Every structure is written in structure tokens, then in C-alpha cells.
Amino acid sequence: MILHFLTQAVFWFLVILTVGSAIVVVFNKRILHSAFALLFTLCGVAGLYVFLSADFLAASQMLVYVGGILTLIIFGVFLTARMYNMSIPEQTHQRFLALLPVLGLGGIIFYVLNSAEWHLITPMVAPTTENLGKMLLTTYLVPFEVASMLLLAALIGAIRLARPRKEDHDD
Amino acid sequence: MLETAITLAKIWGVLITLVGLAAIMTWVERKQSAVMQDRLGANRADVFGIRLIGLFQPMADGLKMFWKEDFIPPRGDKFLHTLAPILAFFPALVIFAVIPFGDVLRIGSLEIPLQIADLNVGYLFILAFGGLTIYGTVIAGWSSNNKFSLLGGLRAAAQMISYEVCVGLSLVGLIMVFGTLELDAIVRGQNELLFGFLPKWGIFVQPLGFLLFFPAVIAETKRVPFDLPEGESEIIGYYTEYSGMRFGLFYFAEFIEIIVMAALFGTLYFGGYNVPYLYAEGFRFPWGAEWNLPHLVVVFLQIGSFFIKMAFFCWLQVLIRWTLPRFRYDQLMKLCWTGILPLAVLNIILTGLVLMVV
């Protein structure tokens, strides 16, 4: 009984944390505050993965998004001159035009949620890592390798772009 | 119901132990540095004339921090300025949740695993929360509204991102040897024997891995050879604008990190709570001798072995802190990207080859 109550409390805490900080991300005027609020959104999503008993996914979410990507975003904001005091335009222009895609996207999400056949399964607290690893190296080997090739290409491209060109050298 | 109570009790126990040990570590650091520099060290704090080799110093420190003025830079960011010490403190503590400090304790029919959370993804959990420590430093640097703090935060971010990669990759070899991401399983695996007599500790199966993991972790904790983010001797780092208990939290987090990292070294590379040749029933020596021991004695020996290893690595970290001068920034980055990283990849390849042959 107490355990059930605790679980529910944690779940709702995570939901409020995720949605609340996501709202801050969108509506805050200072870009760095948005970036820091995103930290809590991503942590909240990782917590929700735990509730779906996707332990590996939750840990990778923390590792990749919170530990890696968000740090890079904040780093980028820091290094961009005058970026962290930049004010984002407050007023929304063309509200009616904006309404169209919002309603459209909302409609699609609602339709999918409504029409999908939801299979309710009892939550399994089974380790997922081993199966994931095996599937990534057998059934899904090609997409896995393609994704890693893409990342490698992006890495090399980034290094190429960041390097000073030959003619820029003074020496 | 009982399970929840036991878990809460374990969390409480670990928390109290860690905070207490961190307080003692501040004393150890002072005393050890004093011995190394031929001084007497912390010996002034006394209660009614009793000095107790300076053991009252941590208490005096704590009182001082509570009474000091808690200053927030007026043009800084108040909310983030308060949040930063919490974000620095929290991940250091949370990592200990997945470290097993003993085997299963049996009381009657009750089985209590001496570990808060036996996560299947313990290795990733450690890396994920280790990565979270960046935010405390970066947010502290930015919210202080001080150029030196901001630059300190930036140095911290660059350093920690770089060394996080090294920490992660240098551990992969160990994961390959034991075939699991679960810390408890890694510790159990280390109680097997190599060639019939050598305990299969991480240091014996992954010597190169340990040599790479150790400096990378020290760099992650931002202590002296790698203390560029805080610039301890010049105090031009990310917590320049902190005072009172807010600074106290940063200071405390550093010592908790030392303890947790020491526990991690012991757990991953030195057999964790294992004592060589000690199994659940007692000692089974490779030359055939047996010595059966009662269950409680075995558990006690295991927890003791865990704490001795932890104490050794705490001592080693303080020793390094007071021995080496600081790295230059380019040396720091060079060590990571052209030293540790390629060797870590080499270690993975070598481990793979050896595993294929064996």
C-alpha cells in the first residue's frame, strides 16, 4: 500500500518535473536558463523510462543527453559572444498561421493516441541490456553500423571544418 | 513493507557513513599534508583543553561555515547560485548507491544484499551520474556573474567532458572480461581464481585498464594535479563567489567524491568486498587447506576488506594531491586525447584478442 503510494508519488513528481521544466525551456527569455531547464526535462524523461522498465534506455538517456549533448549546448552558449545575454523576441507574430501547424500536429497526435491498439502488459523488471546487445550485433547489425558510420563521418567533417585552412596560416 | 524499510535503513546508513567519513577525510587531508610537509597540522581546535590530535577540527570547520556570511553576488543569478552546490553534492552521493559494500547478509530467513540498488546497468549509472557533476561547476561559474568564475566553469566543462570519454573507454576492457554491466556481478567474478591461485581481481586481468582509469578518474574529481577549474592556490575558479555553507557543500562534495572514487577503485579493480580465498562458508586455500567460518564473521571480514581498500585509495589520492604540481592546460588535454584515449582503445582491442584466444 505504502509502496504503491510511493510509486505513484514518484511518477507524478517525474511527470510534473518533465512537463514543468519543458514549459520553462520554451517560455524563458534567457537562453541559458532554457538550457539549464532542459537538464531537468531530460532527467525527468530518463525517470519515466525507468517506469517503463527500460533500464538501459534510461541510463543511456542520462549518459548521452544529460551528460553529453546538453553539456555541449551549454558550452556552445558560453563560447558564443554575447549569446548568454541575448533576449529572444517576446512577441509572437502571425499567431493565426502558427495555429494551423499546432492544431494539425495536435490532431495527428490525438488521432494516433486514440486509434492505436494499446497492449497493456504487466511491467517486467527484467534486464534488457543483454538482449539489446545481442540484437544490435545480429538482427540489427546493418542499421547499427550505418549509424556509426554516419557519426564517424560527422566527426571527421567537424574536425575538417574546425581546422584552420592552409591559406589562413601566417607562418 | 519490510523490504522498503530495509532499503530505507540501508540508504540512511550509507548516507551517514559517507558524510561522517567525508568529515574525517578533511582531517586526514590536513594531517597527511602536514606530515608530508614536516608540520604538525590541525592541532589548535580544542574542547576544554582536550585536543585529540586535531579531531575537533572538522567540527570547528562545520560551525565556522554555518556562521559565516552567506553572500550571493547581487548581480548574479540567485536561483542558479543556490542550485549549483546542490547539483555538485548530489551526484557524488548517488553513485554510491550501486556500489556493493558486502555480500548477502542472512539473518534467519531474511536475505539482505549489502548494496542499495543492484542495477543491471550499474556501469552506465556511474558514468551517467559522474557526468552530472559538470553542471554544478558550470552553473556555479555562470551564476556568480564573475569573469574568473565563468572561465573556471568553462575550464571545468572542457576538462570533464574530455575525461569522461577516457573514464568510459578505459572501463570497457573490464566489462568485456566479466561480461556484465552489473557491479555486483563484476565483484562476484573477481572472487574466482586465475591459474588456480591468483584472485581474478581487475588489476590482474586489466592492468593497463587500471593505469588508464586511475588518472582519468582523478582528473574527473578536479583535484590538484588537475585542479585548473578551481585554481585552488590562487582561488580564481568556479566557486570564487561562494561563501558560508554554500561553499561548504562544494568543499564537502569534493571529499565525498574522493571516498566514492576510492570505493570505485576497490570495487572494480581490487576485488571489492572480496578477501582472497574467502567464500561464503569460509577460507578455501588453493593448497587445499580449509577454514570454515560462521556467516557473520565472513560478512564482517568482507565489509572490513571493502573499507580497508577504500581507506587505502583515499590515502593514495591525498598523497597524489600533495605530491604533484599542477598540469598546464595543454598538457592536460594532450594527456587525455593523445595519451589515455588511444591507449584505452588499444586496451579494448587487446582484451578482445585475448578473450578470443582464451
Image (cartoon, coloured by chain):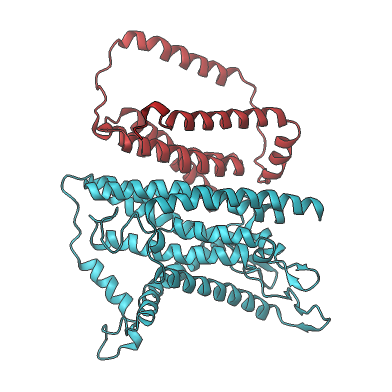
Chain colours: A red, B cyan
Residue farthest toward the bottom in the current orientation of the protein: B49
**Residue B302 rendering spot, x and y as whole percentages:** 63, 74
Nearer to us in this view, B293 or B182: B182
Q: How many marks?
A: 0
Q: Quadrant of residue A30?
A: top left
In this rendering, the answer to whether A106 lies above or below A74 is above
Q: Considering depth in this image, is B328 or B125 the residue closer to the camera?
A: B328
Quadrant where the N terminus of chain B is found in the figure = bottom right
Query: Quick check: can you spot residue A17?
Result: no
Spot occupied by residue B321 in the image (x, y as percentages of width and height):
41, 68
Q: Quadrant of residue B220?
A: bottom left
Image height of B275 relative to A91, above or below: below
Which residue lies at the image location 75% right of the left edge and 67% below the top edge?
B192
Considering every residue shown, the one lying at the far right of the view is: B288
Which residue corresponds to the image point at 41% horizontal and 15% vertical from the top-left? A102
Residue at 32% across, 37% down? A79
Q: Nearer the viewer, residue B266 or B205?
A: B205
Query: Which residue extends farthest left?
Result: B74
Q: Position of residue B340 (x, y in %)?
A: 54, 53
Q: Is residue B210 left or right of residue B147?
A: right
User: Which quadrant does the C terminus of chain B fall into?
Assistant: bottom right
> Where does the image place residue B168, in percent across and percent down from the top left?
56, 50
- Let me know if residue B227 appears in the view: yes
